[in-house]
Image (tube, rainbow, N blue to C red):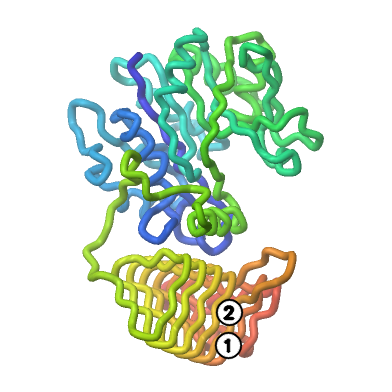
Amino acid sequence: MKIRSLILAGGEGTRLSILTAKRTKPAVPFAGKYRIIDFPLSNCVNSRIFDVMLVAQYRPHSLIEHIGAGGPWDLNRDFTGGVRILTPYRARGSTWFVGTADAVQQNFTFIKRGNIDTILILSGDHIYAMDYNPMIEFHQKNQAEVTVAVINVPIEEASRFGIVGIDENHRITSFVEKPENPPSTLANMGIYLFNLDILNEALWEDHLMQDSQHDFGKNILPRLVETGRRVFAYQYEGYWMDVGTVQSYWQAHMDLLCDPPAFNLYRPDWIIHTRTEERPPALLQKGSTVEDSLICHGCLIEEGASVIRSVLSPGVVIRSGCHVEDSIILTNTVVDQNTRIQRSILDKRIQVGKNCQIGELLDGRLEFAMIGRNSIVPDGTIVHAGGTVGTDVVSSDYPGNEVKPGEYVQTRRLPNEI
């Protein structure tokens, strides 16, 4: 088999709130030093798949800058594969991508070039460490035309996913997208192995259907199952998280911090590769407290500050007297003295003033305070759980010193003033 991996990395990710206000979902930072796209990219190279394409659409600039020529993943290759980014464009008579299948169909002329016979389609916004070779072997053994990776999920969460039914040979007998009453707990992971000829055929048929949503999970795969094509389910047993919501994004971080971690970043046999900056080591001053946390290079935690079950990206500064708990703080954010941050997500380059209260721990409810990139939180400000401060917000944008649950503070400045 000659395999090309195709990563769908164009998601707008509106359910991630301010984290995707200025970047596509796969470019969102994760686990301190990484971005979400690093996980499917690393899975490819660790599985010895070095021919990789990415389909981008929404705000791809930070994604393109991060990936560059692919050097950190050993994908800067000219003749033996490498990584290529298919940037957004509109062909004559077409529209912007309507669904996942439409994104592939519009780029299919480029995708099928070269001597390949199999396409591995991946989502660019999932956290997992998967060797694709057992799935490829399963596909060959069953003489499948399409193989779909599936994972067991709790029955109470099954309605969030595409759910498949299988027979005793693992052949898919039903495929229902986000059913109200799920017939099983086998969820579609958004990982598909297609023989090139059937992918070509299925995309063209779907393109001609005006009532289609042009989506793999909603249209392509159910239609292939209904028409009797050889579609099989490969069951994955490891950790997998779709970080498409604020809650799942936060939970995936907490899964790194428990003992033992639900998802282990420290496997020497499965390195997650990324592009990193040169930073000095993290400095934890005498009298500071750090428990069950990930602290990246360039961080400073001053005397008397405490960081509990949290993730600090490179260059974060926590001044004396601060308390950070169950939170995620991204690159180059500075938190001034005696501020308390609980169950919150702070984006890059934020300036948090003194004596602030951001978020709180609510019994039985997962609600988060969120602060957008490049914003300022003035001294003494309270941002309650469920409150959001948008990107590029300055002191004069706040209506008062309190952001209440459900309230959204945004900048009043014009774009040319930012």
Q: What crowding class fits label 2: few (fewer than 14 Cα within 10 Å), some (14-19), or many (20 or more)?
A: many
Foreground residue among 68 and 254: 254
Residue at 54% across, 59% down: 254
Residue at image point 52% right, 9% down: 142
Considering only vertical position in the picture, is 125 above or below 106? below
Give the labeled residue for mark 1.
Answer: 381
Return the mark for residue 32: none
Compared with 69, 312 (above or below) is: below
In the visual, does 8 lie left or right of 171? left
**Could you tell me how far apart the alpha carbons at marks 2 and 1 are, in whole angstroms?**
8 Å
* Marks 2 & 1, CB-CB < 8 Å contact: yes
| Of the two numbered discs 2 and 1 in the rendering, the one whose residue sits closer to the viewer | 2
In this orientation, which residue lies closer to the viewer: 218 or 338? 338
Q: Position of residue 76 (x, y in %)?
A: 21, 38
Q: Earlier in the sequence, mark 2 or mark 1?
A: 2
* Location of residue 215 by image quarter: top right
* Quadrant of res 251: bottom right
Which amino acid type corresponds to the residue marked 1 in the rendered image?
Thr
Residue 212 placement (x, y as % from top left): 65, 27
Which circle marks residue 358 in the picture?
Answer: 2
Amino acid at pointer 2: Ile
